Image: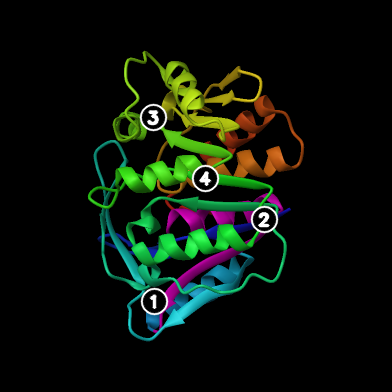
Amino acid sequence: MKALSFGEILWDVYPDKKCLGGAPLNFAAHFAKQGGQAYMFSAVGNDELGLSALKKISEWNVDTKYISVLNDRPTGRCVVALNGQSVPEYNVLNNVSYDYIPYQNISEKFDLLYFGTLALRSGNNLKVLKKILAENKFPEILVDINIRPPFSSKSSVLFAVKTADTIKISSEELNTVADFLDIHDFSDCGGFSLKLAERFANLKRIVITLSSDGAYCMDCENGKSFRCPAVETKVLSTVGAGDSFAASFIYNFLNKKDIQYCLKSAAETASYVVSKYDAVPD
């Protein structure tokens, strides 16, 4: 299976270290670890962080063919602090290389296109992504909603939902997404999913991660709902957990596994990731 992941490459900068990341890159790395072929469509700066990123991405077995190197923009950075519950708080720097991803012609066929919403803060990137969608056919499109104030907008979330076959949302982001989409009067993730599916007929699957309560998925094509519990583990950091969950879920789904299996596998993968400090652990 071959996936193209569009969006940000950035360094998460902690008080004592820096780690390469960005949701699309984390997703690509975990998709490759699952056994798939992953390509990044992004940009880095022609600086030390950018060159280090390209080296690390190759070590993760992610293809760098569609990563541009820009001379006039620095590589993306995000200053991260973990609160008392080990949940990350982000300060995402603006006007960096991944805000100006150049268009490139795509020469191979992909089974999957993945993108999030953070990189869509840039009007340039939205134009590039629309051109990619117009000029290429993707059998499956997975969108992971990434709410990163103040860079999240109603227009980017609406575009994402209208484009996706499968959409992933975390429970922490659910109310913000519901407000953006004017979805109200729901009691739980199942009620939200019903309303979302009614409004957006393109959606085939709605996946909601529920932190310590596990995960939920609605199969919109037959109206069935699935749940799985979280796998208990000692949490060191949740950075990258959702990205690993998405990669495991969609990799197994593309390989014809049933949704219950996909949820279980994704929960197991995410539980391993949160037990480590790195978003893409060995």
Mark in front: 4 vs 3: 4
Image spot of residue 122 (x, y percent) = 34, 62
Residue 69 falls left or right of residue 86: right
Residue 14 falls left or right of residue 270: left
> What residue appears at the point 70 percent right and 40 percent down from the top-left corner?
252
The residue beneath circle 3 is 171
Distance CA(mark 2)–CA(mark 4): 12 Å
* Mark 2 surroundings: few (<14), some (14-19) or many (≥20) residues within 10 A: some
For the residue pair 164 and 26, the one nearer the viewer reads as 164
For the residue pair 180 and 263, the one nearer the viewer reads as 180
- Numbered label attached to residue 95: none
Q: Amino acid at mark 3?
A: Ser
Judge whether 134 appears above or below 247 on screen: below
The residue beneath circle 1 is 49
The residue beneath circle 4 is 163
Image spot of residue 264 (x, y percent) = 62, 29
Label 2 secondary element: loop
Q: Amino acid at mark 1?
A: Leu
Q: Which residues are magenta?
A: 22-46
Mark found first going from the N terminus, 2 or 3: 2
Image spot of residue 273 (x, y percent) = 50, 44
